[in-house]
Image: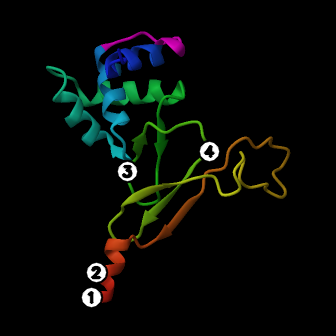
Amino acid sequence: MSESAEERGASLLRSRGMRVTRPRLAVLEVLGAGGHLEVDEIATAVRTRLDSVSTQAVYDVLGALSRAGLARRIEPAGSPARFEARAGDNHHHVVCRACGAIGDVDCVHGSAPCLDPVGAGGFVVDEAEVTFWGLCPSCQEHQADD
C-alpha cells in the first residue's frame, strides 16, 4: 500500500524535528504540486484544503519550511517572493522577461557550488544562486508574430 501525501508530509516534518500541523501539511501539499508560487497563490490553495487560514499563518509556515530545508524562497528581480518544494539541490532558475514565467535549471557544472568566485573575501561558499533571464517559447512566438 502506498503512502498518502499527508503521511509523506508528516514524515518529512518529523524528519526535520517539526511539529505536524494541518497548515504545514496543506502548504507542503500545495508546494508538492510543483511550480514557483507566490504567497497569495499558496494561501488560496491552502484555504481550499482547510476551513480557514490567515495569510500570515501561511507566511509563518513558509518561513519554517524554508528554514528546515523543505521549501525554497526565490526572489527574481522585480517580482514578489515565490516558493517551491525543490530545495537543497543548488538548482537555479530561468525567468521570462516578458511574462515572468519561471523554470528550473539544474546546476551548471553538476556540483555545489556551481561557481567558484574569485576574491570571496574569506567566505566559504556552499551555494550559488544564479538567475538566467530571457524569453520563454510562448513569448518568443508572440514577439515573432508582432
Disc 1 crowd, CA 10 A, few/some/many (<14, 14-19, 20+): few
Name the amino acid, label 4.
Answer: Asn
Name the amino acid, label 1.
Answer: Asp
Q: Real-space Cα distance between discs 4 and 2?
A: 32 Å
Q: Real-space Cα distance between discs 1 and 4?
A: 36 Å
**Residue 33 image point, x, y percent:** 33, 38
Q: Nearer the viewer, mark 2 or mark 3?
A: 2
Return the mark for residue 142.
2
- The residue sitting at 18% across, 21% down in the picture is 50
Taking the magenta stretch, the answer to whether it contains residue 17 is: yes
Taking the magenta stretch, the answer to whether it contains residue 81 is: no
- The residue sitting at 41% across, 57% down in the picture is 102
**Residue 23 image point, x, y percent:** 30, 20
- Please give the residue where the numbered disc 4 appears in the rendered image: 90
Asked if the residue at tag 4 contacts the one at tag 1, i.e. Cβ–Cβ closer than 8 Å, the answer is: no
Name the amino acid, label 2.
Answer: His
Name the amino acid, label 3.
Answer: Pro
- The residue sitting at 37% across, 34% down in the picture is 32
Asked if the residue at tag 2 contacts the one at tag 1, i.e. Cβ–Cβ closer than 8 Å, the answer is: yes
- Mark sitting earlier along the chain (4/2): 4
- Please give the residue where the numbered disc 3 appears in the rendered image: 80
Q: Real-space Cα distance between discs 3 and 1?
A: 30 Å
**Residue 87 image point, x, y percent:** 53, 37
SS at mark 3 in the image: loop
Return the mark for residue 145.
1
Disc 2 crowd, CA 10 A, few/some/many (<14, 14-19, 20+): few
- The residue sitting at 66% across, 49% down in the picture is 128
Nearest the viewer among 118 and 134 is 134
- Tell me which colouring the rendered structure shows: rainbow
SS at mark 4 in the image: loop
